[in-house]
Image (cartoon, helix red, strand yellow):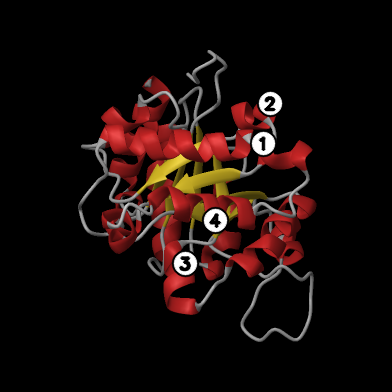
Amino acid sequence: MSATGNRRTPLIAGNWKMYKTVSQAEAFIAALLPRVSSLQGVDVAVCPPYLALQALVDSARGSPVQVYAQNMHHAPEGAFTGEVSAPMLVEVGVHGVILGHSERRQMFGETDRALQLKVPAALEAGLVPILCVGETEEEREAGDTERKLRHQVQEDLARVETGRLGEVVIAYEPIWAIGSGRVATPERAQEAIAFVRALVADRSREQAERTRVLYGGSVKSENCGELLCLPDIDGALVGGGSLDPESFAAIADAAASS
């Protein structure tokens, strides 16, 4: 529940990164669907590599599981070797897209300027964008967490129409927690996510109440319960914990029960 008592449907999204071939992805979804088919009050999404998108859309059709991509280019087409556009994703039945993941920012040079274009392009195409934000360990130790989050949220959402802010999902991922096995304490996670919501509220309090803010960073079935019950956390962006169907289903079940 949010602080005002309005229920936002939690979202559990599994970011597979560069794991699973098409055949492995099909085996995963076959194992996952029976485990989540009866869940109520939670949205479930898997985010496979590009090559498995079509196969998963076909396998999950008619089920509660949605399929998201891990990235996209802001332009609908063009001379951008190696890129994939929103219309291409929409054509194969993809529902949403992760944007600005810290690995894209750190390893592949993705900028806030690029995300200013990508987020509204995803919305315009009918895709749900999951915008990732978060601080490094150095920034956290320097007391710069809020400054970093303010910069990312304000810059990356700058070109989104105010009335559509609530359609953007924001994932707070402390970079120092990703893949490290270290998880932000519930108090620290709640504080950071409440701050992200307040940044959206600076533009529209009404839209901030609609905005789903997820936690990401070494989320597992063993630790998700205490995070998902916090007032401002509306689900999780799950990395390694999403690669096993049983573990991922357990996280989705915890969100449905929170």
Secondary structure beneath disc 2?
helix
Residue placed at 76% from the left, 40% from the top? 162
Query: What residue is shown with label 3?
Result: 22
Residue extending farthest to the top is 5
Query: What residue is shown with label 1?
Result: 166
For marks 1 and 4, give the CA distance: 19 Å
Q: Position of residue 76 (x, y in %)?
A: 79, 69
Q: Are marks 2 and 3 in contact (CB under 8 Å)?
A: no
Residue placed at 34% from the left, 38% from the top? 189
Decide which of tag 2 and tag 3 comes sooner along the chain.
3
Question: Residue 83: which quarter of the image?
Answer: bottom right
Neighbour tally class for label 1: few under 14, some 14-19, many 20 plus, Cα within 10 Å:
some
For marks 2 and 3, give the CA distance: 41 Å
Query: What residue is shown with label 2?
Result: 206
Decide which of tag 3 and tag 4 comes sooner along the chain.
3
For marks 1 and 2, give the CA distance: 8 Å
